[in-house]
Image: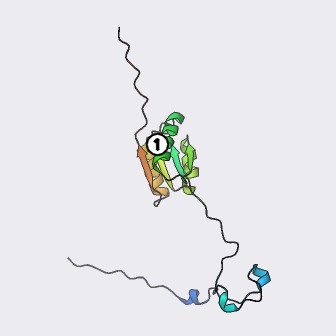
Amino acid sequence: MMSYMTSLALNTDELSEAPKLRLLAAEDSALGGRPSGQSSAERPALRLINGPAATKHPVLVAGGDSAGRAAVMRDLSESMPASTTFAEAGAFWEVLVKAPDTSMVILSGELDELPAESLMQMLAHRHPGLPVVSLPAPTSAPAPVARA
């Protein structure tokens, strides 16, 4: 059996015309830096100014039963870090809208009569890097049996 190697050639002409990042000396007052009495050797070479705030992506818990979603979130909050945030979806369309902004989707039962397996496949197709977990739908505790 022969194996073939595929190669990819990139045109680097466009990259040479791309903007370049340069380090420029800045005025202390413009950047809110140190007093001008300090030497430039004491100042850091690079600083991030007005950088984007770190965003936390919640864990999306989806299921048609609100009590089931609450039970899943309660269990997850006990086992996941305290900083974990959760979002809920009770309908199929909500999962599709909220999924791109989450760190993980946890399915707890079916949504709008759509089996969890079908929704998992749809999410895997739309967002291949998004972890999706399907848990069995929570069942309520059996009612106690009355004995005479």
Residue at 56% of width from left, 44% of height from top? 88
- Check disc 1: other Cα within 10 Å, few if <14, some if 14-19, many if 20+: few
Residue at 47% of width from left, 45% of height from top? 78
Where 116 sits versus 49, above or below?
Answer: above
Q: Nearer the viewer, residue 55 or 45?
A: 45
Where 124 sits versus 20, above or below?
Answer: above
Q: Quadrant of the C terminus?
A: top left
| Residue carrying label 1 | 75
Q: Residue furthest front?
A: 37
Q: Position of residue 117 (x, y in %)?
A: 41, 45
Q: Answer with left or right where residue 30 lies relative to residue 73.
A: right
Q: Position of residue 86 (x, y in %)?
A: 55, 48
Q: Position of residue 71 (x, y in %)?
A: 49, 38
Q: Position of residue 31 (x, y in %)?
A: 75, 80
Tell me, what colour scheme is on the image? rainbow
Type of the residue with mark 1: Asp
Q: Answer with left or right where residue 15 lies relative to residue 26.
A: left
Where 122 sits versus 69, above or below?
Answer: below
Q: Nearer the viewer, residue 79 or 61?
A: 79
Q: Residue furthest right?
A: 29
Q: Residue furthest top?
A: 148
Which element type, helix, strand or loop, lies under badge 1? Answer: helix
Residue at 37% of width from left, 17% of height from top? 145
Q: Quadrant of the N terminus?
A: bottom left
